[in-house]
Amino acid sequence: MSDDAPVVLTPPDKMPRHVAIVMDGNGRWAQRRLLPRTAGHREGAKAVRRIVQACGERGIEVLTLFAFSSENWNRPRREVDVLMNLFVTTLRGEIRRLDQANVRLRFIGDLRAFSATLQEYIAKAQRRTAANTGLTMVIAANYGGRWDIAQAARRVAEAVVAGKLQSEQISPELLHDFMSLSDLPEPDLFIRTAGELRISNFLLWQLAYTELYFTDRLWPDFDVSDLEAACAAFAGRQRRFGLTGEQVARRDHA
């Protein structure tokens, strides 16, 4: 969208409760400007700040951001190092701002792979904001959807071996309780930037009935008008959850 385009607000009752975003395009943003890819990641962090504020202002309950996938370790070493340092500096610089904005910060993923320093900052950030009641901001770091399902299955298996569960008790509903984010509403709206049309191993379990929205905007350029465009597209869709359109219409007008 043009920077001069008016921002049309989605009605509050049509807004998604939970928005999940794959923030793609940092490297391409930098390359188009003849800058190192790492400059794109730093600019992408500014976009995060904009969207967190916009989500809070619009009453969105949960924002989940795919910050670092379990596959991202395969990127060039220098880029990974910059991303790790950016995690630390961003947490250190933003935690006070997030706390003052009543944002509750959560992390999901296998955090054991990170340095002791980063793990310490993550723990401090979560403790400091745990009692906040505004937007819940979830950072998926060293996360993969297949990892999430596997860790849930492992924990269920351990419960069966320990005699706490019977195998016949295992159901989708039970497995859900062992997944990341099981205490939060499932994503209503998935956004991926930079023109890629993939989920890329993000929240595979949780996205079962999520509305998907793809945009060509590179993440560092993603702004409030882009968020509104995504929310407006979501508001215009009929969510059926296995029902027919006629059944949904009758339900909505009951």
Image (cartoon, grey):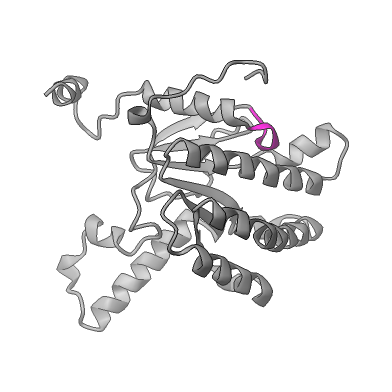
Q: How many marks?
A: 0
Quadrant housing residue 122:
bottom right
146 left or right of 4 in image: left
Residue farthest top in this picture: 5
| Residue positioned 55% across, 71% down in the render | 123
Q: Which residue is pictured at 42% across the width and 49% down the height?
A: 204
User: Most extreme residue toward the bottom, as rendered?
Assistant: 162
Quarter containing the C terminus:
top left
Looking at the image, which residue sits at the far front? 100
Between 67 and 104, the residue placed more toward the observer is 104
Residue 62 percent coordinates (x, y): 43, 47
Residue 241 in the magenta stretch? The answer is no
In the rendering, at what x and y percent does residue 125 appear? 56, 65
Q: Residue 251, located in which quarter of the rendered image?
A: top left
Residue drawn at 38 percent across, 25 percent down: 11
Q: Is residue 64 above or below residue 243?
A: below
- In the image as oriented, which residue stretches furthest toward the right? 34
Along the line of sight, the residue nearer the viewer: 181 or 148: 181
Question: Which quarter shows the N terminus?
Answer: top right
Which contiguous range is marked in magenta? 217-222
Horizontally, residue 177 falls left or right of residue 201, namely: left
Image vertical order of residue 154 relative to residue 241, above or below: below
Residue 170 at x, y = what percent?
Answer: 21, 64
Residue 21 vs residue 196, the one in the foreground? 21
Q: Position of residue 203 (x, y in %)?
A: 44, 50
